[in-house]
Image (tube, rainbow, N blue to C red):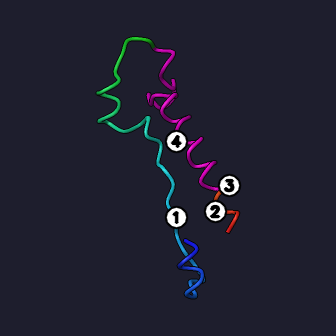
C-alpha cells in the first residue's frame, strides 16, 4: 500500500471480509444441532461472522494509519 501511495495513487479499494458465517460451504462444514451458534434471523453462524467483523475492524485500523 505504501508503494502505491509513493507512486501517486490517490484512491484505492481494499475489500474486507464478507460475513463468512453465511457462506454455504462453511455452513455445511461447521453444521451442528446447537441452535445457539446460529443467528435466529439469518441462520448464519454467529461466531464466524464475529470473526469477519473483527478482521474488518483490524483492517480499518491499519488503513487509517495510511
Q: Which mark is residue 52?
A: 4
Q: Which residue is mark 2?
A: 63
Q: Which residue is mark 3?
A: 61
Q: Which residue ends up furthest to the top in the rendered image?
A: 33
Q: Separation of disc 2 and disc 1 at Cα?
A: 9 Å
Residue located at (49% from left, 19% from top): 37
Check whether the beta carbons of the residues at disc 2 and disc 1 lie within 8 A of each other.
yes
Check whether the beta carbons of the residues at disc 2 and disc 3 lie within 8 A of each other.
yes
> 10 Å neighbourhood of mark 2: few (<14), some, or many (≥20)?
few
Of the image marks 3 and 4, the number of the one nearer the N terminus: 4
Viewed as shown, does residue 8 lie left or right of 17?
right
Q: Is residue 57 above or below residue 3?
A: above
Check whether the beta carbons of the residues at disc 2 and disc 4 lie within 8 A of each other.
no
Of the image marks 2 and 1, the number of the one nearer the N terminus: 1
Please identify, in this view, whether the residue under mark 1 or under mark 3 is nearer the observer.
Answer: 3
Q: Which mark is residue 14?
A: 1
Q: Separation of disc 2 and disc 4 at Cα?
A: 16 Å
Please identify, in this view, whether the residue under mark 2 or under mark 1 is nearer the observer.
Answer: 2
Instruction: Locate residue 32, reporting x and y percent.
Output: 36, 15
- The residue stretch that appears in magenta: 35-60
Residue located at (59% from left, 41% from top): 54
Q: Is residue 34 above or below residue 54?
A: above
Of the image marks 1 and 3, the number of the one nearer the N terminus: 1
Amino acid at each position: 500500500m505504501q508503494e502505491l501511495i509513493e507512486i501517486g495513487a490517490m484512491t484505492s479499494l481494499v475489500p474486507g471480509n464478507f460475513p463468512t458465517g453465511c457462506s454455504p460451504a462453511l455452513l455445511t462444514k461447521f453444521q451442528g444441532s446447537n441452535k445457539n451458534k446460529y443467528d435466529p434471523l439469518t441462520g448464519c453462524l454467529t461466531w464466524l461472522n464475529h470473526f469477519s467483523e473483527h478482521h474488518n475492524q483490524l483492517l480499518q485500523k491499519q488503513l487509517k494509519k495510511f
